[in-house]
Image: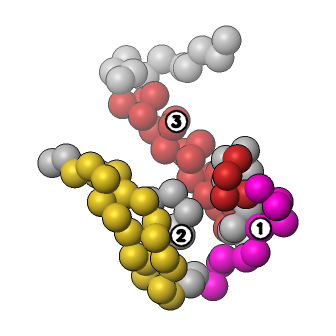
Amino acid sequence: VKGALTGEKVRVKVLKAHKDFGFAKLLEVIEKSPKRVEPVCPVFEKCGGCELQHLNYEAQLEHKTNMVKNTLKKCLIGNKKKKPLQMK
């Protein structure tokens, strides 16, 4: 859910539900994560260009590292011959 952090207790409005995933809108953060910080950007909730500003810096680095790892894993799943990935 956009705006919610892992481990937080939140209230959401379910927008769409599928078998394996769904979409929801964050209505309220009931219990905040210790990693949550106040975003510096005044248009944080409207723009989307700085979507990780509500995470402390260490958590941002961890999140970005995990995103890269997951992307690489997905690339390697379809690479049955284990050829090196070509960067273009």
Dots 2, 1 in contact, CB < 8 A: no
Circle 2 crowding by C-alpha within 10 Å: few under 14, some 14–19, many from 20: some
Q: Does residue 29 lie above or below 76 as drawn?
A: below
Residue at 56%, 63% (x, y): give it: 3
**Earlier sequence position, callout 3 versus callout 2:** 2
Q: Which residue is most to the top?
A: 88
Name the front one of labels 1 and 3: 1
Residue at disc 2, secondary structure: loop
Instruction: Provide the residue span drawn in magenta.
Output: 34-43
- The amino acid type, in three-letter code, at marker 3 is Leu
Residue indicated by mark 2 = 5
For marks 1 and 3, give the CA distance: 29 Å
**Earlier sequence position, callout 2 versus callout 1:** 2
Residue at 46%, 66% (x, y): give it: 26
Q: Magenta includes 35?
A: yes
What's the mark number on residue 39?
1
Front residue of 80 and 41: 41
What's the mark number on residue 18?
none
Q: Quadrant of the C terminus?
A: top right
**Earlier sequence position, callout 1 versus callout 3:** 1
Residue at 45%, 38% (x, y): give it: 73
In the rendered image, residue 28, in percent from the top left (x then y), is placed at: 49, 76
Left or right placement of residue 67 versus residue 12 in this view:
right
Residue at disc 1, secondary structure: loop
Residue indicated by mark 3 = 72
- The amino acid type, in three-letter code, at marker 2 is Leu
